[in-house]
Image (cartoon, rainbow, N blue to C red):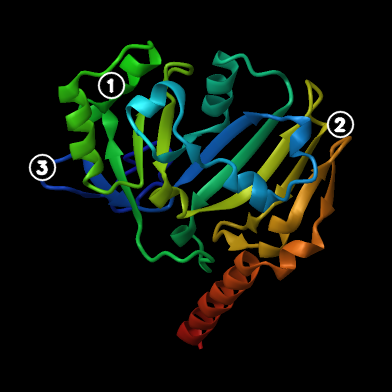
Amino acid sequence: MSNFFKSNSYFQPVYKHIDLPVYITDEFRFFRCLEFKDSFYGKTVSELHAGNLRISEGRYSKLFPDQKISYWADSPETSRAEIKKHGAGKNILTFFAYDDLTSTCPILDNEEPLVIIDGRKCGIQDLIDKVEDGKSLTSKEKDYMQKILLQSPDCLVYDSHARKGGENYIFLEKGFKKLALRQVKLRLGERPAKNSITICCADTSDYMPAIENYACYFKPLARTGVDQDYYRTAEYTDRVKRYNESLYKLQDHHG
């Protein structure tokens, strides 16, 4: 038991593949920052979160051709440093996510903990650094990357160069679907007390979900609204069903 990764809670068991740097564990916290754009106004938290998973483009398409990926970090500080490195402005949207099985009442269709590959221990860090520098991968390196992906990981962890000591996570689609939201925070400019607002989607140390808040959206001047149509979606219905099933099992266990 250890705090093996910075995002991992203390004293969680970490199971390792006998040969490869592949780990299975849970109780993680992840953060993703984006420069906020006016086009984000009116989009529900559910839509904004779904937009975090995109087809790999540009330099990372060399590592993950034709795959959907999502970038996360161990802390808001690391994530902000990453987007600042690429020229982001002062209006920042921050997602705070956790692996759904961490919650006392999970809401997603998943019963498997996170499968993580430590890219720092198998050469992937070097490949990531290489594509960051705009260099092409050799055929041998591409084949090696495919061999790693055959382990069916949820995400790969590597060191941040934007913030010393920070960790970055590249989530593949399989792993992204294991993430639920705790908070989404909008900060406009440099006056966070006046121009910031947070939508909470889970609370307490047990990550008890507030599924109804996935229907919330941001409005100008750091305000929020609720899209009632979300409550008629299959996503909302499924998540409420799973939440109630989890709650029933919990009550039955303690009853």
Taking the image as shown, residue 242 lies to the left or right of residue 215, namely: left
Measured along the vertical axis of the image, is residue 56 above or below residue 152?
A: above
* C-alpha span from label 3 to label 2: 52 Å
Which residue is most to the front?
66
* C-alpha span from label 1 to label 3: 20 Å
Q: For residue 145, what is the image quadrant?
A: top left
Taking the image as shown, residue 73 lies to the left or right of residue 50, namely: left
Taking the image as shown, residue 212 lies to the left or right of residue 228, namely: left
In the rendered image, residue 242, in percent from the top left (x then y), is placed at 54, 73
Label number found at residue 194:
2
Q: Amino acid at mark 2?
A: Lys
At horizontal 89% and vertical 35% (from top left) the residue drawn is 221
Assign a secondary structure to mark 3.
loop
From the viewer's side, name the closer residue of 37 and 65. 65
Of circles 1 and 2, the one toward us is: 1
Label number found at residue 127:
1
From the viewer's side, name the closer residue of 200 and 82. 82
- Of the image marks 1 and 2, the number of the one nearer the N terminus: 1
Q: Amino acid at mark 3?
A: Asp
In the rendered image, residue 15, in percent from the top left (x then y), is placed at 23, 51
Q: Which residue is mark 3?
A: 19
At horizontal 17% and vertical 31% (from top left) the residue drawn is 144
- Of the image marks 1 and 3, the number of the one nearer the N terminus: 3
From the viewer's side, name the closer residue of 18 and 10. 18
Taking the image as shown, residue 103 lies to the left or right of residue 231, namely: left
Counting other residues with Cα less than 10 Å from the Cα at mark 2, is it few (<14), some (14-19), or many (20 or more)?
few
- Of the image marks 3 and 2, the number of the one nearer the N terminus: 3
At horizontal 80% and vertical 63% (from top left) the residue drawn is 228
Q: Amino acid at mark 1?
A: Leu
Assign a secondary structure to mark 2.
loop
In contact (CB < 8 Å): disc 3 and disc 2: no
Counting other residues with Cα less than 10 Å from the Cα at mark 1, is it few (<14), some (14-19), or many (20 or more)?
many
